[in-house]
Amino acid sequence: MDGHKHVTAGVFITGTDTAVGKTLVTAALAWSLKELGLDVGVMKPVETGVAKGQLSDAGRLTRAAQISDSLDLVRPYAFRLPIAPLDAARTERRAIKIPAIMRAYRQLQAQHDLLLIEG
């Protein structure tokens, strides 16, 4: 141990609405950075509109980054309805807990040199 703390860089990708290209931009960044030889992780803390048997945004991101991190880590919260996250959580009678998101974030951060987070 050299006494220095390993610090992972992170980039947060956000947009003002649904279907504005956040996943496309994040996936393109992940793929491009991976092609440059960087160890890139991805995260989408809360995803709505998740349907069984269909590729989700989190799945697209893991494919683009060419990683095998579990979807439960990449996407701590998944909801069926394609509506705002808090509304989707209320509909499913679940709560979104920031500590759970932060645990997943820290684990991914420890595993990768760069972490792309889609909001």
Image (cartoon, rainbow, N blue to C red):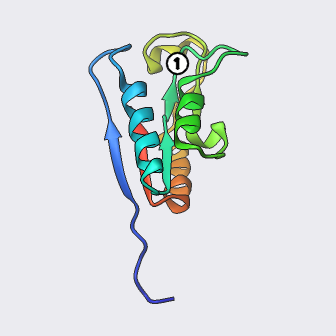
Is residue 75 at all visible to an observer of this figure? no
Residue toward you, 103 or 7 = 7
Image location (x, y in percent) of residue 106:
50, 56
Binning the other alpha carbons within 10 Å of mark 1 as few (below 14), some (14 to 19) or many (20 upward) gives many
Residue 38 vertical position relative to residue 54 in the rendered view, above or below: below
Image location (x, y in percent) of residue 22:
37, 26
- The residue furthest right is 53
Is residue 29 at all visible to an observer of this figure? yes
Residue 36 vertical position relative to residue 84 in the rendered view, above or below: below
Based on the displayed image, in which of its 4 quarters is residue 20 positioned? top left
Residue 20 vertical position relative to residue 119 in the rendered view, above or below: above
Q: Is residue 11 left or right of residue 36?
A: left
Residue at the disc numbered 1? 48
Image location (x, y in percent) of residue 26:
40, 34
Q: Amino acid at mark 1?
A: Thr
- The residue furthest left is 16
Residue at the (61%, 43%) spot, across then down: 73
Image location (x, y in percent) of residue 90:
53, 16
Residue at the (33%, 41%) spot, across then down: 12
